[in-house]
Amino acid sequence: YTGLSAGIALAEAGKRVVILEQSSVGWGASGRNGGQIVHSYSRDLDVIEAKHGPAVAEPLGRMMFEGA
């Protein structure tokens, strides 16, 4: 219910809010989406390191493994 929750929070803060839903409020993806953010890259870190060097790849690797 991320969009609904954000809308409620904004309305409670005095903002004018419009929430659009295809069906009932909280229906569909709003009520079923896990909302997961996966920290990964489209290339393996060794490929990134080969192209851009360890100065670029190592911080990316740390961020990925630390969940930043």
Image: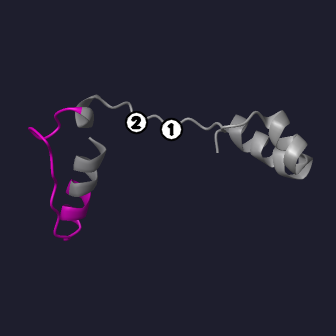
Range covered by the magenta-colored residues:
8-28
| Res. 7 image quadrant | bottom left
Circle on res. 35 = 2
Whether 17 is among the magenta residues is yes
What residue type is disc 2 on?
A: Gly
| Label 1 Cα crowd, 10 Å radius (few <14 / some 14-19 / many 20+) | few
Q: Secondary structure at mark 2?
A: loop
Residue 61 at x, y percent in the picture: 77, 40
Q: How many numbered marks does the figure carry?
A: 2
Quadrant of image for the N terminus: top left
Q: Residue at x 33, y 32 (%)?
A: 33
Q: What residue did someone put label 1 on? A: 37
> On screen, 61 above or below 20?
above
Farthest residue to the front: give it.
51
Farthest residue to the left: give it.
24
Give the Cα separation between the discs numbered 2 and 1: 7 Å
Q: Is residue 58 visible?
A: no
> On screen, 9 above or below 49?
below
